[in-house]
Amino acid sequence: MKTFWMFMALGTALAGDLRSEVLDQLGSYEGSASAEQLGALGDVGPVLLDIAQDEAVASSRRGRAITALADFPSDEARTWLGSTLGDATGASYLRRKAAYALAGGWGPQAVDQLAPALADADTQLRIATAEALGGIGGEAAAAALDARVATEDNDAVQQELQKALEAAR
Amino acid sequence: MILTLWLACDGDKVLDDTGAVSSDDLQVEALGSFSTGDTGGYLGDVSYTVPDGAAGAMLYCGTFGDSTLGSLWYLTEPDGTLIYDGDASGNTFRASFLDDAVPVLSPITPELPLQSGTYAANIWLGGGQPKSVNCEAVYKVASVGNSASVQLELVFVGVPDLDATSAKDDPSFQAAIAQLETEWATAGVTVSTIYSDFSGSADTYAVVNVSGDDYSEFNDLLRTSNPVSDKAVTVFLVEELTIDGTTVLGLAAGPPGASTLHGTSKSGAIITTIDLASAPEDVGKIIAHEVGHFMGLYHTSEKTGQTHDPLADTPECPASADTDGNGTVNTSECSGQGAENVMWWTLTDGDAELSGDQEWVLHRNPVAAN
């Protein structure tokens, strides 16, 4: 029994070390960690999702954790990203990160999740979603962007829609 | 002590008595137009003459467009010593490939103190097509002591629930400024600030997005810099700066930036403020770090641990410290080896500090008032 608790304590310490190391990597001033750098630390997917959801963590590190989830995809992550993107009461910043992560991690499969955000009340989210869809490219993404062009009345968003359409086609 | 000036929201610059930052110690030398012609991309010798008594100098050549990269390739001191050779490795002097314009700042290390007399710089421009640029040099002629002050014009660009007026009473923002003040005080630098609201499109620039190698949005925002004082550094506070959707905490023009020149793509720094609510001190750290880059400081050690700044007294964390083998030297692996420095490559907890050599460099930058 004593050995069991010793292993449990060691596991908890190692998990704490991993989280601490991931947080350090996510704090880089001018660029975030690459998938290779994060992946080399261990099984970081669950840690990234935990950080992404942790309201006690600084916003930029949560945002970078969300972005990194694209490189460590899981069904749990996709579900959480979808609900974060769709939560109109949530923080605009985290919703934007969710849009990019869905596009980066799931590509064409994420178009249906992303498309509704093109009509969101949040201007910056619409810009981010347009860019994310442009990055996915292909027929479905272009169709979603094209459908929004006719009704979008914000100049900055319209400009991004045009850029994204060009990239998607 | 922080000296703070408040600006009216209509963009008029309103200064109080503490706002006078003299630029009497600056001298500008117009060097004329230079062309790559058929020189394989080299401008040829751009000569500039540092006057007696100068503490700092900055050569600036531009513009050649956001889609073209250029770099200092050779730099020869007045005594004939070649201190930068783009064909060699291990130069003590530093140069970077930059788009649109190339600033060359001296000194960036006490090992290469500024000399009076004529420097010769040769700058290489890419892109293949012949290009012409204008060059000028700025000299700071002043005695440098143990203290200096730097004026920052803080421009609020669509930061949610914060502008030049509300920031003065905003506890989170003031905590950020206090952190900046604390960290720069370790180098004998005091900060004065001017608060200003961005007059352009906040929808366009509240989130500054760099896509791939396209830095035009970043550059365009810096081109709007127009501070009240020639010596001020413009710091644009945006909600978020991103590169391909990934948050970047901050980026300085250059480095180094175009000290005392405004309205260029190398005029200032852009700072992500998304952490103001959750970790306000971090925003102060980001400003301290990025303006450090603008003024000629480099990371004490880059994240791979393979390259280090050109300063003798900043600790180095070598690649061999990467005990977890992930290709980066992280904060816990580099305790006592630079991780406590303002110019460490990643955010750390607590108050970071600057070294004596870093202080030496900051005090000699043309933006610093002595």
Image (cartoon, helix red, strand yellow):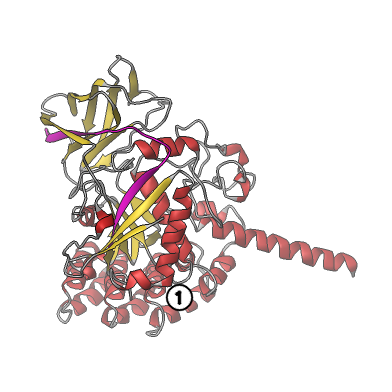
Residue A120 horizontal side relative to residue B283, left or right: left
Residue A38 location, x and y as percent? Answer: 54, 55
The residue positioned farthest toward the top in the image shown: B80
Q: Is residue A27 visible?
A: yes
Where, by quadrant of the figure, is residue B158 drawn?
bottom left
Question: Which one is nearer the viewer's eye here, B209 or B140?
Answer: B140
Residue named by callout 1: A81
In magenta stretch: residue B281: no
Question: Which one is nearer the viewer's eye here, B204 or B110?
Answer: B110
Q: Chain of mark 1?
A: A
Residue at 55 percent of width and 42 percent of height: B338
Classified by dominant secondary structure, the portion drawn in magenta counts as: strand
Q: Is residue B39 above or below residue A112?
A: above
Q: Is residue A32 visible?
A: no
The residue positioned farthest toward the right in the image shown: A1
In magenta stretch: residue B135: yes
Question: Which one is nearer the viewer's eye here, B332 or B257?
Answer: B257
Residue B334 location, x and y as percent? Answer: 60, 44
Q: Which residues are magenta?
A: B130-155
Where, by quadrant of the figure, is residue A46 drawn?
bottom right
Residue at 45 percent of width and 60 percent of height: B178
